[in-house]
Image (spheres, rainbow, N blue to C red):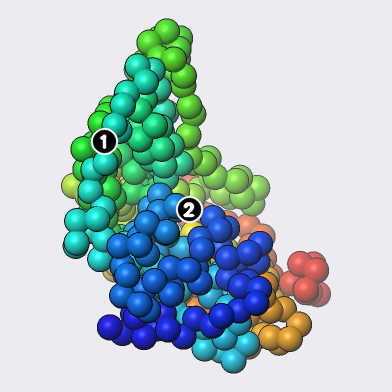
């Protein structure tokens, strides 16, 4: 009932910016399913939502919600809780059995291989499977989900939501082959010979090089191996593999410095706290944004303003306009970080 009341706040906007180019990137028809929820028509709400979004239970939890920034009511700082409504629609659809296997009525006789089982691979598999093709998804890790499973911490999305959707897709006939690294365990030429089409949906796992002196010291780590290890640790999987050969990375009892101010950095902050870090300091090269934006200047676009994630709220010390110059070490191990204050053009302040 509370969600229905929230949906009722959606206005009959002449131009609903929430699902235009300034709002939802997948063009969810937000005013339409808000109205359906308000009227208690949850079945048609999930049908509408699924017409633009294969997995609303995922986006309803981890999307940054630019739709709410673009909401007309955000001019008064009271946007409709669109993300919460989306999550509720998906969860209720599972409860009522609306989200269940829908096997295709006819089969085409064509076979498709998909490399990678992240969100792109899963969405492609579902669409192709429902079109009647015989779909096989290849994943090098031991479980499907890609970076959504291994790159995003549990405190942002619990992995049983992924498992639930995988089961539904398997019920529609999609086959998942895990622990197979295409190009290593299975030659690409073999895939091309066995299938009518091959679709590559690999995730972006290679970090940008820091290019900071000392970044090869023991104790300096990239975010991706760190987050992947923790997700595997929580999932009861071996933390090291051919794909992720890094030695164990644990922040327990350590003073941790996180370089970067984005979502990935925030995920590292929250993970470090959960591992028992003594202190976590986050360095952001950007100026500290204002607490509140000028609505008339930026709305309906994504505003630059001070945002505090749940991870940062757990006690991270945040430093702005700070550039990392060098990682200092002794006997090959990290002992400190050399930084400097920079101006708005990221030039060192003398």
User: Residue, x 63% and y 87% (percent of image)?
Assistant: 75
Using the image, determine if residue 261 lies above or below residue 180: below
Q: Nearer the viewer, residue 111 or 261?
A: 111
Residue designated by label 1: 103
Asked if residue 238 can be seen in this view, the reply is no
Return the residue found at the far bottom: 76
Image quarter for residue 19? Answer: bottom right
**Mark 1: few, some, or many residues within 10 Å (few <14, many ≥20)?**
some
Q: Residue 342 carries which label?
A: none
Image quarter for residue 101? Answer: top left
The earlier-in-sequence mark between 2 and 1 is 2
Helix or strand or loop: what does disc 1 sit on? loop
Helix or strand or loop: what does disc 2 sit on? loop
Using the image, determine if residue 260 lies above or below residue 189: below
Q: Which mark is residue 52?
A: 2
User: Residue, x 52% and y 41% (percent of image)?
Assistant: 204
Quadrant location, the C terminus: bottom right
Q: Which of 3 and 262 is in front in this view?
A: 3
How much space separates mark 2 and mark 1, taking CA atoms?
A: 19 Å
User: In the shown orientation, is residue 259 left or right of residue 189?
Assistant: right
User: Residue, x 18% and y 47% (percent of image)?
Assistant: 236
Discs 2, 1 touching: Cβ within 8 Å = no
């Amino acid at each position: 009932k509370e969600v229905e009341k929230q949906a009722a706040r959606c206005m009959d906007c002449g131009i609903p910016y929430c699902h235009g180019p300034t709002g939802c990137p997948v063009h969810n028809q937000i005013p339409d399913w808000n109205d359906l929820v308000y009227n208690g028509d949850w079945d048609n709400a999930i049908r509408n939502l699924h017409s633009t979004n294969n997995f609303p239970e995922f986006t309803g939890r981890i999307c940054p919600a630019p739709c709410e920034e673009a909401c007309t009511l955000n001019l008064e700082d009271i946007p409709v809780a669109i993300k919460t409504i989306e999550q509720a629609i998906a969860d209720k659809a599972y409860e009522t059995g609306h989200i269940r296997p829908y096997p295709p009525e006819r089969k085409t006789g064509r076979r498709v291989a998909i490399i990678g089982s992240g969100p792109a691979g899963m969405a492609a598999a579902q669409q192709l499977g429902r079109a009647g093709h015989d779909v096989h998804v290849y994943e090098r890790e031991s479980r499907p989900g890609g970076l959504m499973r291994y790159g995003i911490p549990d405190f942002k999305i619990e992995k049983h939501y992924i498992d639930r959707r995988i089961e539904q897709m398997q019920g529609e006939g999609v086959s998942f082959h895990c622990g197979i690294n295409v190009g290593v365990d299975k030659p690409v030429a073999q895939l091309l010979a066995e299938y009518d089409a091959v679709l590559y949906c690999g995730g972006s796992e290679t970090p940008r090089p820091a290019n900071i002196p000392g970044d090869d010291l023991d104790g300096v780590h990239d975010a991706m191996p760190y987050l992947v290890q923790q997700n595997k640790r929580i999932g009861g999987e071996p933390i090291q593999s051919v794909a992720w050969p890094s030695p164990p990375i644990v922040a327990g009892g350590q003073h941790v410095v996180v370089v970067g101010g984005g979502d990935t950095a925030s995920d590292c902050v929250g993970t470090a706290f959960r591992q028992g870090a003594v202190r976590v300091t986050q360095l952001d090269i950007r100026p500290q944004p204002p607490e509140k934006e000028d609505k008339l200047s930026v709305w309906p676009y994504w505003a630059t303003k001070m945002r505090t994630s749940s991870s940062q709220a757990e006690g991270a010390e945040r430093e702005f306009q700070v550039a990392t110059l060098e990682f200092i070490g002794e006997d090959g191990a990290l002992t400190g970080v050399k930084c400097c204050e920079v101006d708005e053009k990221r030039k060192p302040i003398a």
